[in-house]
Image (cartoon, grey):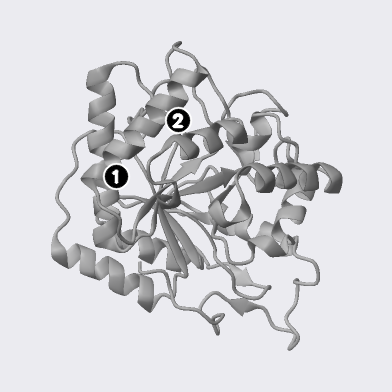
Amino acid sequence: MAAGEAVKPVLWTIPRRPLGAHMSIAGGIDLAVERAAAVGCTALQIFTKSSNQWAARSLPEDEVERFRQAVVRHRVERVVAHDSYLINLCSPDDALWRKSIDACALELARCERLGVPWLVTHPGGHMGRGEEYGIGRMAEAIDAIHEQVTAGSSSLALETTAGQGTVIGHRFEQIAAIIARAAAPARIGVCLDTCHVFAAGYDLRTPVAYAETMARFSDILGWPRLVAVHVNDSKKDLGARVDRHEHIGKGYLGLEAFRLLMNDERLQAVPLVLETPKDETCREDVMNLETLMGLVDGGKARPEGRPVRADAARRPGRPAGAGARRAGR
């Protein structure tokens, strides 16, 4: 497919579920929904602002309304947001830490306006001060963010990390400790990234390994906290502690890990979102989504013998009202 050529949407060969990709907000946040719909996504992740700048342009009310209407019109079932790459909520530098708190609070408030229920954020890097310092600093930052943005329809979701450098969050126990120390733990969710947990040392490649990893997640964090999954293969091997995403089945995780993921009944209603490499056509998203669908047991053909496009009859349930390098490594 040549650059600029319209992409053909994924052919849905399984019952609808929240399945999609991170989409660019270039030209307006509402255009991310249009890009997702063009690919055939039923789930979507966005940035609420430029990911590599502290400054955030204002969100005009008409753009917010177009976004909300597009989510409903295209029947996107789940939308999540990801915060800026610059934010480090564990930084021992008080100026950067305070700036990160304010930036994250601003993004959470933008999620409220957009009707996006979850803002995914990475636990930051302690910059050599140690794990315990990082955990306490992160919990304190979350409390400060919650003071700025009162409880509403949008909340923070802590993402599992690969553990590069001094970044915390690569062990389930670390995330659990952050949540436990926060003043309002009920407001905090968790986003599991398949590449990150694998790079952190949690194996997913066999039925036994997958079951063990998910049992540990359940025991330490609990299934109710899982609000999103970033579905990425890994360019690096198990335990490498390096965050490098790869196309589904093309990395060290391999297809079997994603077969287990796609057939896990506990994840049927959880948004599964790609953060795999792609160009502006999003053709790689179609490739990866169709690969994932092809791994579902018995899901390669509908009973009537025809594939179902993403705009076909949707599963019951209302649409949602509405990765990555990080600072501090």
Residue beneath disc 1? 146
Q: Distance of mark 2 from mark 1, alpha carbons?
A: 24 Å
Looking at the image, is mark 2 or mark 1 nearer the viewer? 1
| Quadrant of the image containing the C terminus | top left
What residue is rendered at 37% in x and 41% in y?
A: 183
Residue beneath disc 2? 325
Q: Amino acid at mark 2?
A: Arg
The answer to whether residue 245 is left or right of residue 39 is right
Is residue 49 at least partly visible in the picture? no
Q: Position of residue 70 (x, y in %)?
A: 33, 72
Q: Secondary structure at mark 1?
A: helix
Q: Position of residue 203 (x, y in %)?
A: 75, 37
In the image shown, does 21 or 155 lie closer to the viewer? 155
> Which quarter of the picture shows residue 66?
bottom left
The answer to whether residue 200 is left or right of residue 63 is right
What residue is rendered at 54% in x and 52% in y?
A: 225
